Every structure is written in structure tokens, then in C-alpha cells.
Amino acid sequence: MMKIFFHFKLWWLLLVAGTFVVSLLTSSNIAFMSLLISVAGHLLFSIIVALIPMLFYWIIRRPLNNEQMMCTITAGWLILAIANLSV
């Protein structure tokens, strides 16, 4: 699991940059702390949503590989990004 944080730096950079852009577009006031909290909350949501299928597959003894974990985190990120942009 920790490999996903250290071996895929470009993916994390793109995910954080995309989160920053979505936060800028949907923020009512643009302040550093509000953007930081928005970015952190967005990434935390996507990781928590991704933990559900990761935990399920871990329970049935077929853990996800790194690419599958990245896909589930990205799917969680997309769900929240689309929800934020559509409001």
C-alpha cells in the first residue's frame, strides 16, 4: 500500500493539481487556508471512498494491485469533482 504513495509521484501531482483547480473553481472565497482545507478534504474523501472496494477485496483474499488502487482513488476523486462542478 505504501508503494502507491512513493512510486507514482506524477499521478499524485496530477491528482493534487486537479483537486486544486476544482477547489479554485468551486470556492466561494479564495483564501489559502480555505483552498488547503478543500484540497485536503477532497483527497481524503477520494481515499476513504476507495477504501471500501480495497477492504472488500482484501477480505476475500484478492487484494488490489497498485494500478487498481490508483483507479479506485481516481474514481472517488472524479465522483466528488463532478459533484462539486455540477453545483
Image (cartoon, rainbow, N blue to C red):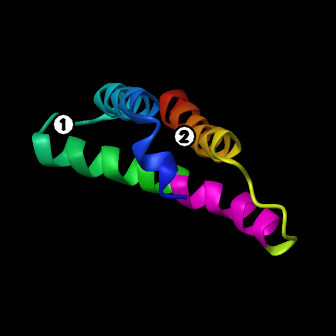
Q: Is the stretch drawn in magenta largely helix, strand or loop?
A: helix
Position in image of residue 12 (x %, y %): 41, 36
State the SS at label 1. loop
> Looking at the rendering, which quadrant does residue 86 occupy?
top right
Instruction: Identify the image quadrant of the N terminus.
Output: bottom right
Q: Return the disc, 2 or 1, that comes first in the chain's sequence.
A: 1
32 left or right, relative to 61: left
Position in image of residue 19 (x %, y %): 39, 34
Q: Which residues are magenta?
A: 47-58
50 or 8: nearer the viewer: 8
Q: Which residue is mark 2?
A: 77
Whether 43 is drawn above or below 87: the answer is below
Position in image of residue 36 (x %, y %): 22, 46
Q: Which residue is mark 1?
A: 29
User: What is the three-letter code of the residue carrying label 1?
Assistant: Asn
Q: Of tags 2 and 1, which is closer to the observer?
A: 2
- Residue 53 forms part of the magenta stretch: yes
